Image (cartoon, rainbow, N blue to C red):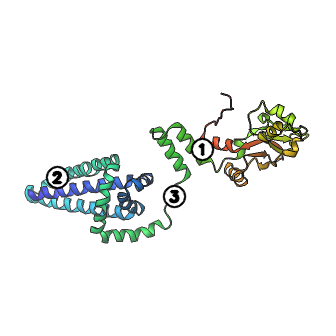
Amino acid sequence: MSLLIFFITISIAVSFLCSILEAVLLSISPSYLLSIRESSPKIYKKLNPLRKDIEKPLAAILSLNTIAHTIGATGAGAQVQVIYGSEWLTAFSAVLTVAILILSEIIPKSIGARYWKGLAPMSARIIPSLIFITYPLVWASDYISRFIKRGAADKITRDEVKALADIGYKDGALTLDEYNTLKNFLSFPHRPIKDIIRPIEVVKSLPENLSTLEAYDILKKESYSRYPILGVHEDDLKGYVLRSVVYDYKIRNESVPITSVAKKILHVDSNEKIRRVFLKLMKRREHIAAVINEDSHFMGIITLEDIIESLLGIDIKDETDEN
């Protein structure tokens, strides 16, 4: 009887441990590893290689699990025949199968999947020993898997990151602002600049025939820092003027043509990506660009502030903006 109990206990106990280790290993996420790289470097150094080359620890765990099941079931079955006779073997096998399924598969895997963060440090210490014990089987499994994989492992896609953001927001890990900002950053390289321009209908511009003093009379009622200068028609862009420059001329009481103090304005295609326009503005140290469509018509303007607002998903206001 003692041998029967021994074989059943060994089979279930070893399998219980293997099932927990398997569930924990498969639950460890790349984001968790990055989060513990600084806070728990020792655990990170043990877990990262296991998760990076996951085939080896899985092969060790599954090999030991299979060995435990096989030896335990065989040994227990033999003891049942000795003690109770062969007529009880079928019934015992059925009961043992259910017990192994519940006690060494369902329960431990549920525990491992639920409490994997707390069990990860322990798993990091145990799994290397299992790899060492079952190394011949691990080596054989690794050799076979090379022919099966035939290529690099799948990489995380942009859609998967978006899905993680959705899950994080629904689970309360991300606030609405954080969620919107993350989604905006993910779409940043692909969105055209025309999605966020200030259309010509709302752009405050100045005619080219104004003087600086005349321009001051207009700009003193406005709050923007930069204003496009237009010629005889709206597609005739002469550049842009800084409000601060106009104010300087007012202080000195000097009147010169507004075009003489205008700066060249960067032209960008309406279909250019936001990221590309942002890099152009940064490279040229500009804060404003004119957006031109495929027919060479002036559609509106874009500013660094507009781009930042589109990324953060908020409306940036300063002390001159109306509430």
Q: Residue at x 68, y 28 (%)?
A: 322
Q: Which residue is mark 2?
A: 92
The nearer-to-camera label among 1 and 2 is: 1
On screen, residue 250 versus residue 165, left or right, reads: right
Amino acid type at mark 2: Phe
Amino acid type at mark 1: Asn
* Residues at marks 1 and 3 touching, judged by CB atoms closer than 8 Å: no
Name the quarter where the C terminus is drawn.
top right
Q: Residue at x 28, y 51 (%)?
A: 105
Q: Secondary structure at mark 3?
A: loop
Residue at mark 2 to residue at mark 3: CA–CA distance: 47 Å
Foreground residue among 211 and 195: 211
Q: Is residue 301 visible?
A: yes
Q: Which residue is mark 1?
A: 184
Q: Which residue is mark 3?
A: 155
Whether residue 305 is situated above or below residue 189 in the rendered picture: above
The nearer-to-camera label among 1 and 3 is: 1
Q: Position of residue 72 (x, y in %)?
A: 19, 59
Foreground residue among 49 and 148: 49
Please identify the quarter of the rendering in which residue 45 is found: bottom left
Foreground residue among 2 and 317: 317
Q: Any mark on residue 309, and which?
A: none
Q: Is residue 86 visible?
A: no
On screen, residue 244 versus residue 173, left or right, reads: right
Q: Quick one: label 1, few (<14), some, or many (20+) residues within 10 Å?
A: some
